[in-house]
Amino acid sequence: MQGGCQGCKLDRDQFDIAMAFQPIVDVETGRAFAFEALVRGGNGQSAAEVLSGVSSENRYAFDQRCRVAAIEGAVAAGILDTGAKLSINFLPNAVYSPAACIQLTLKTARATGLPIDRLIFEFTENEEMIDTDHVKNIVETYRTMGFGTAIDDFGAGHAGLGLLAKFQTDYIKLDMELVRGIEASLPRRMIVEGVIRIANSLGIVIIAEGIETLAEYDILRAMGVRYFQGYLLARPGFDRLPVIDLPSRSFAAVA
């Protein structure tokens, strides 16, 4: 993107945003493995409403503002008192140079006392990749710097397994459409089982997101999934870290 990241100056008034936080739960410990920062309007407006104001002209500024708001908001909400990581969504097409464009993020993390090894950057497979080599460079640069990386909405977007063949992230977040009603769908079960086998072979951690029912939860646990995110365990908390409501049988051995 034209303009440059070197100065890393950001007009906070350009985007009136806040963050909600939803836990990614390690159901073997019962604790939050990470909290995903979800963008909201300053008065709690939905993510869709906020994102409707993002264009190619302001995408870089929006991406930078979200990173700062996520870190500052999570620290204010008390994430430093937990062992949890912070997962931040980013727009690959807004990053023209990963090493340069990460500087404001690093500065904010240092200012708030958040260790950088507790940061995960996730990008959605639903965003069309203009240049997959560029995305690969971002992922590799971030991992070299000590950040975790994740593909969000895996199985619903533009690239799927082809993207995974080109580069591997630390985490894959299964798209909710793959897990919705999985207990009653043989094709969904077979697809998810296949993705889990591939991820395990590549050393990639699976996160099941959008979990809303005990039936979905139980079958994914039986498949060996350890990390879960969804309304069944906790709804997003606006400007706060929500309490986890863990299914009572979560600590049982995987069948």
Image (cartoon, rainbow, N blue to C red):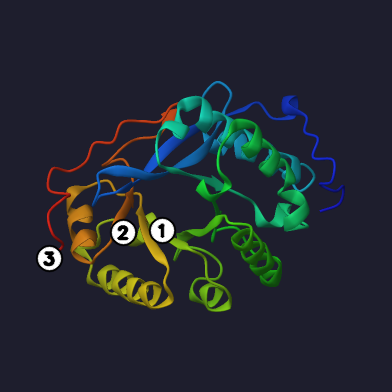
- For residue 255, the mark is 3
Q: Is residue 52 visible?
A: no
Mark earlier in primary sequence (3, 1): 1
Residue assigned mark 2: 179
Residue appearing at x 22%, y 71% in the figure: 186
Residues at circles 2 and 1 in contact by the CB criterion of under 8 Å: yes
Q: Quadrant of residue 138?
A: bottom right
Residues at circles 3 and 2 in contact by the CB criterion of under 8 Å: no
Q: Give coordinates of residue 89: x percent, y percent.
A: 56, 48
SS of the residue under disc 1? loop
Q: Nearer the viewer, residue 210 or 133?
A: 133
Give the residue type that dot 1 points to. Answer: Asp
- Which residue reaches farthest top? 43
Q: Give coordinates of residue 113: x percent, y percent.
A: 58, 34
Residue appearing at x 78%, y 52% in the figure: 100
Q: Quadrant of residue 172?
A: bottom left
CA distance for labels 3 and 1:
23 Å
Q: Give coordinates of residue 101: x percent, y percent.
A: 75, 50
SS of the residue under disc 2? helix
